[in-house]
């Protein structure tokens, strides 16, 4: 696009499309009240001539609302109780605000409300969506696909093969790949269509994730390096890929682990307490715990203290997240796997906005570029040593 | 509206408006692509005949999105740090979900973003708005008025006389009435246009509030009843009516108070600490503190302990909110003025939905009823005694 050439006018667009200037204008201004074949002709003329409307009109023709929905697939009570979401929202908010986009947080009471969220997304109120905390069997991914809004997921979604290609009314399901021994993206790697695995799973889907599996491996190796041989694992909800990947990482290092050393939990402090009690009842001789997040590690620490066990002397404990002010305020302060939660939010927003910009461009060149766009960005994790291990 | 009479048809509407059935239908289905005078004629015919479209069409003619925006006039970091907002959102979320309305939380980084919020509200993405935590000089009320969306405020807004009648582009300002000696609504009273005061201020504006002034009076009377004669007050931000009203209540009881016993703060724990230090430096002999909310009271308690002062023996402390789990977990547990924050949120949502239902009704009878609708609902407060006073 050179500035030297005169810009094509709206009149030229109208002439090429064979419609009146008023009709062409109406299409450029959103297309309301114009029959679809005419809209199509005008749009084609716009593309062929490389017509660039002024900024205001352009935002109308591209139907940009400068608004992005955030959907957290948890009840609002959890959204406000778990600082993880506040941190991720902080990153998202900063990035969207820097680009003068409105953050539209869609809150729900629970999964029963996800159909309504899908209707809102389909209603043309936002340009795109950022979705996180997906669980297995959640209808959201299918609803979002049908809503047709560009979406970036927080955390790797995992559709089963059957649904990857369909856009019918069937159930869209997430599927957990726990213990299937598949590799994940390397640290910081931007993966397109990966070799191995099932590339069709994630075709066209964009997501930002941490390297959960590698982070878990690092944590468990550290515990083993401390000479701990009876390492237990408090998992997150295994219908989420983040939890399943951390379990995979744990198993990578503890290949023949006694299954009684693994207890499924739910990422909450109360869940961590319950799991710790279970594990101690089953294996009172355990001498290390890897908890799948800091909140459940905090619950585990309380139970260990209650039972008179010293940390780390009797039981070493490692968490995941490095969530502040949680990890630094436990007793003792928590050794944990750090992921940059705020940065993940920021990156999700950045990816979505850049995809929206590509869509808004009035040429067809981006269609090809889009196919090569990265589908997943996986951020590295690091071990942060404090007192608990 | 009787069921016996045959319902007027769309054809009848078209005939009365003097337009084709297709045009009438298009107006009933949203009005897109129809010139404004025709839209007006069809709408009038709909009203005159009492035409009731079927549910789906009706939601289109009334342009209901079944979505309600929530705007908290604070940066998102504060929204997630102060459990007050989580509680109010909980009430709002429950009520909206019960009526299958989507809660759309519009987050911002700060006041600079309020113009964008105004644009979103004006963009036809929601049916109405719930707005709280307004501050003096915030452009939001003016932006909301211009956006033309029905709104219920949390906390009494306070426009100055100059702006009450205008809907031009001028600055719309909130004005604090602190220390003007005006009465507030009695506990639980539903106020229409009150005698005294400036009725034009709140004409047409709906809000839900607690009886902040009466609550403050109760707290301070309790301290005086304990024999405390040197009662200090840590205020909230005085550009908010809730804080100004609590200061008024404090002054109602302590008429000739030494101004050095009053310190303005900001409803945060850190602000409470700062204010407590100021007050102790100025009046080391103070023997009671009324803090304008529980979070600042918690900060004050920490400073008192740090200075070696016993609570309540040396200094009695009362907060405001009865926010759990804050008030019951301070050391010592906090005596405080309880307001039902979740119920306030629920009531805001309920009032808005009922106003939207009135608007959606296709008769003009509601226009008259609307004028008599309550403008403010003020909930009573109660003193909750724990150990700090």
Image (tube, coloured by chain):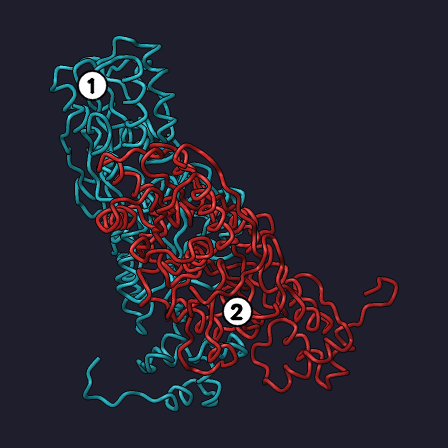
Chain colours: A cyan, B red
Q: Residues within 10 Å of mark 1 (few under 14, many from 20)?
A: many
Considering every residue shown, the one lying at the far right of the view is B4
In this rendering, would A342 be left or right of B326? Answer: left
Locate residue B203: give its quadrant.
Answer: bottom right
Disc number for residue A311: 1
Residue occupying image coordinates x 36% and y 20%: A275
Q: Is residue B234 visible?
A: yes
Callout 2 crowding tier (Cα within 10 Å): few <14, some 14–19, many ≥20:
many
Q: In the picture shown, does residue B30 fall above or below A244?
A: below
Q: Is residue A79 left or right of residue B352?
A: left
Chain bearing tag 1 is A
The quadrant in which residue B365 appears is: bottom right
Name the residue beneath numbered marker 2. Answer: B149
Q: Residue A370, position in %: x, y?
A: 29, 60
Pick the front one: A387 or A52: A387
**Distance from the alpha carbon under mark 1 to that under mark 2:** 57 Å
Which label is found at residue A283? none
In this rendered view, identify the residue nearer to me: A240 or A75: A75
* Figure disc tally: 2
What percent of the width, then of the height, locates residue B94?
A: 54, 46
Looking at the rendered structure, the secondary structure element under dot 2 is: loop
Q: Is residue A46 above or below residue B117?
A: below
Quarter in which the C terminus of chain A is drawn: top left
Q: In terms of secondary structure, where does tag 1 sit?
A: loop
Q: Nearer the viewer, residue B353 or B182?
A: B182
> Where in the figure is residue B49, as x and y percent of width and height?
78, 76
Q: Are marks 1 and 2 on the same chain?
A: no
Task: Identify the residue at image location x=15%, y=33%.
Answer: A383
């Amino acid at each position: 696009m050179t500035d030297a050439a005169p810009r094509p006018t709206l009149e030229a667009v109208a002439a090429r499309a064979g419609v009146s200037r008023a009709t062409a204008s109406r299409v450029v201004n959103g297309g309301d009240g114009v029959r679809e074949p005419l809209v199509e002709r005008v749009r084609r003329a716009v593309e062929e001539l490389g017509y660039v409307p002024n900024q205001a009109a352009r935002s109308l023709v591209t139907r940009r609302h400068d608004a992005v929905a955030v959907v957290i697939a948890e009840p609002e009570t959890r959204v406000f109780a778990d600082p993880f979401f506040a941190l991720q929202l902080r990153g998202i908010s900063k990035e969207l605000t820097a680009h003068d986009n409105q953050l539209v947080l869609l809150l729900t009471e629970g999964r029963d409300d996800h159909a309504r969220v899908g209707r809102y997304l389909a209603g043309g109120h936002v340009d795109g969506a950022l979705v996180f905390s997906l669980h297995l069997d959640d209808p959201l991914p299918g609803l979002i696909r049908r809503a047709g809004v560009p979406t970036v997921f927080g955390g790797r979604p995992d559709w089963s093969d059957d649904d990857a290609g369909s856009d019918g009314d069937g159930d869209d399901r997430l599927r957990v790949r726990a213990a299937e021994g598949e590799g994940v993206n390397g640290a910081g790697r931007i993966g397109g269509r990966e070799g191995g695995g099932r590339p069709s799973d994630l075709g066209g889907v964009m997501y930002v994730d941490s390297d959960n599996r590698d982070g878990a491996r690092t944590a468990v190796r550290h515990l083993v390096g401390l000479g701990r041989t009876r390492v237990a694992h408090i998992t997150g909800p295994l219908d989420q890929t983040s939890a399943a990947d951390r379990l995979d990482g744990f198993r990578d290092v503890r290949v023949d682990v006694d299954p009684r050393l693994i207890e499924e939990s739910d990422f909450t402090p109360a869940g961590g307490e319950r799991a710790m009690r279970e594990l101690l009842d089953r294996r009172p001789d355990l001498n290390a715990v890897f908890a799948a997040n800091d909140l459940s590690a905090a619950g585990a620490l309380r139970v260990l203290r209650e039972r008179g066990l010293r940390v780390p002397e009797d039981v070493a404990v490692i968490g995941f997240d490095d969530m502040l002010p949680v990890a630094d305020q436990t007793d003792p302060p928590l050794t944990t796997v750090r992921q940059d939660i705020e940065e993940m939010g920021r990156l999700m927003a950045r990816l979505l906005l850049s995809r929206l910009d590509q869509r808004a461009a009035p040429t067809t060149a981006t269609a090809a570029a889009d196919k090569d766009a990265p589908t997943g960005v996986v951020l590295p994790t690091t071990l942060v040593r404090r007192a608990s291990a």
